[in-house]
Image: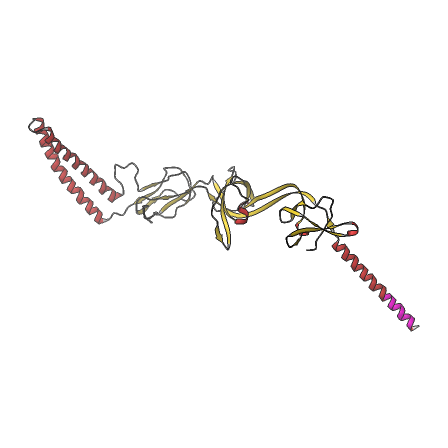
Amino acid sequence: MKNKTNLYVSLFILIIAVAFVLLQQTKSDHKYTASEKPKIVNLKLRQYVSGILIPEREVKIKSQISGIINKLYHKAGDTIHTDDLIAEISILPNPQNIEIAEKTLKTCEINHEKCEKEFKRYKELYAKKVIAEQEFDKYRESYLISQEEMSSAKKQLQIIQKGYSQSQQNIPNFIRSTVSGTVLDIPLKEGASVTERNNYNEGSTIANIADLQNLIFKAKISESDVAYLKKGMAFEIGISALKNKKLKATLSHITPKAVEENGIMKFEIEARVENNHDIQLYPGFSAIAEIILDKRDSVLTIKERNLIFKTDSLYVELLGRNSKKIKRLVKTGLSDGLRIEITEGLSLEDRVKVQSN
């Protein structure tokens, strides 16, 4: 009786073991025989590039003279037009230069007074025909030269004292805007020192002015993607500060030389932003551009994960009758990172084995 019981127990254990093995094999076969068919889709290779908005034209207003800012007529954010007064500069004259200029003027006045007397005396003699015209011309010329020298000395003294002469139409110590736009920044305050612009010094900036109606998107793109770009191509940018509001942009510039950044060669690009002025944009807004580098319409595709790479070949595993696996070489085209174009080797009726990776 005991032997019979042991036999039943052993038989029961054997049946359970066989059932478990068959169940695991069924699950395993089901797992590795999952398949899908190729699909016709539109592929787009997208690249997302972060950048900022900057004015297309920004002008720095400089001073032509050195001195102190006496008064400012505008502040950051003001709308300004060409020839509008921005600031008034008071110069700090050099005492030594003033003394030299005053001495020069005094000398010219003495010489002018002397020449004027001689001119008047010889003019009377010439009128009485006592002297020849050639002799009179000599004193008349000396008188005119002395008059011009005295006038020049007066202007020079005025320029040293005030920064300009009364005969000047454009007074240099009144700083005016050369363009129309919006004042971005006034770096200096009233009472600050100003350095003049010359051949050796770019001078102090009185104001930064830009046209905020014309902004450009500026970013850097890697060398692997720049080959896809062409001037005039359109794309969309999302403005982060405006909840990713979409605006159209047109590529206007690609730098001809790359710059290394963190070990990657990058090219700087610029694109004009199209704004219908119902949105207020500001320089410095961060933006993300969605650039379509390449696209294919209505092409045969599979999921890229189902490709098998071996040396220099690409192939997929097809499932035939009774789930028999068949390897087939394929040629590929464009990929968007998820699906890849199949140019040769597959048809819509093929069953591609889903890879477990």
x%, y% of residue 341? 65, 45
Residue 10 included in the magenta stretch of the image: yes
Q: Residue at x 60, y 45 (%)?
A: 45
Q: Residue furthest bottom?
A: 2
| Magenta-colored segment: predominant secondary structure | helix
x%, y% of residue 199? 32, 46
Give the magenta range: 3-12
Residue toward you, 114 or 218: 218
Asked where in the image residue 206 lies, by quadrant, the reply is: top left
Residue toward you, 33 or 282: 33
Is 67 displayed left or right of 146 in the figure? right
All told, the count of numbered labels is 0
Is 2 displayed left or right of 199 in the figure? right
Quadrant into which the N terminus falls: bottom right
Asked where in the image residue 59 lies, by quadrant, the reply is: top left
Residue toward you, 78 or 156: 156
x%, y% of residue 197? 33, 45
Quadrant into which the C terminus falls: bottom right
x%, y% of residue 17? 82, 64
Residue 290 included in the magenta stretch of the image: no
